[in-house]
């Protein structure tokens, strides 16, 4: 599985210095303690999903041939839930509906 970190990635409870370090570790597929990521659903069932980042490093996910977009990163599951709410609010405000892929579309 290849990770693609969105250019508009949302974050919570993370300083700029920590943010840069985390993005580097994610791009290198290194384990990170207490990191949660907000992604589109892996199997088109739902709008967004929250994963413990280290779970995505397991062999089952590594063998997947798809690209996984990362829309948000957080240090706790509760913060990740808040990011999901923020993303949905922004999608409704900017696009008038829950078009999450449209919100993160390049261009």
Image: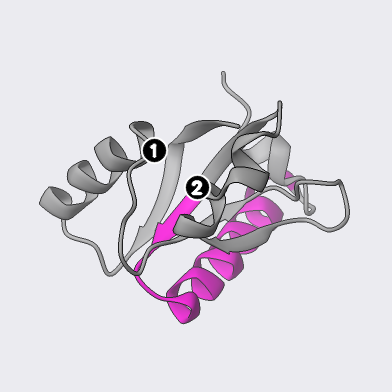
Residue closer to the observer: 50 or 14: 50
Horizontally, residue 25 falls left or right of residue 100, namely left
Residue 57, disc: 2
Q: Of residues 82 and 36, which is closer to you in this image? A: 36
To which quarter of the image does residue 90 belong? Answer: bottom right
Q: Residue at x 39, y 38 (%)?
A: 29
On screen, 66 above or below 78? above
Residue at the spot 30% in from the left edge and 65% down from the top edge: 33
**Mark 1 neighbour class, 10 Å CA radius: few under 14, some 14 to 19, many 20 or more:** some
Element on which disc 1 rests: loop
Q: Is the image coloured rainbow, by chain, by secondary structure, or in one colour?
A: one colour
- Kindly identify the residue that appears in the image at 47 percent across and 53 percent down: 72
Query: In the rendered image, which quarter is residue 61 located in?
Result: top right
Residue occupied by mark 1: 29
Q: Quadrant of the N terminus?
A: top right
Residue 40 in the image: x percent, y percent? 69, 47
Q: Residue furthest right?
A: 45
Residue 96 in percent (x, y) is at: 77, 51
Q: Are circles 2 and 1 on residues that touch, CB within 8 Å? A: yes
The boundaries of the magenta stretch are 72-95
What separation in Å lies between label 2 and label 1 (alpha carbons)? 7 Å
């Amino acid at each position: 599985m290849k990770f693609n970190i969105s250019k508009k990635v949302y974050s919570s409870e993370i300083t700029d210095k920590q943010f840069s370090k985390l993005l580097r570790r994610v791009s290198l597929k290194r384990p990170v303690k207490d990191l949660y990521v907000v992604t589109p659903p892996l199997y088109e069932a739902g709008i967004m999903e929250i994963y413990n980042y280290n779970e995505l490093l397991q062999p089952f996910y590594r063998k997947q041939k798809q690209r996984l977009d990362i829309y948000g990163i957080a240090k706790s599951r509760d913060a990740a839930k808040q990011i999901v709410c923020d993303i949905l609010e922004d999608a409704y405000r900017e696009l008038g509906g829950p078009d999450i892929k449209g919100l993160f579309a390049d261009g």
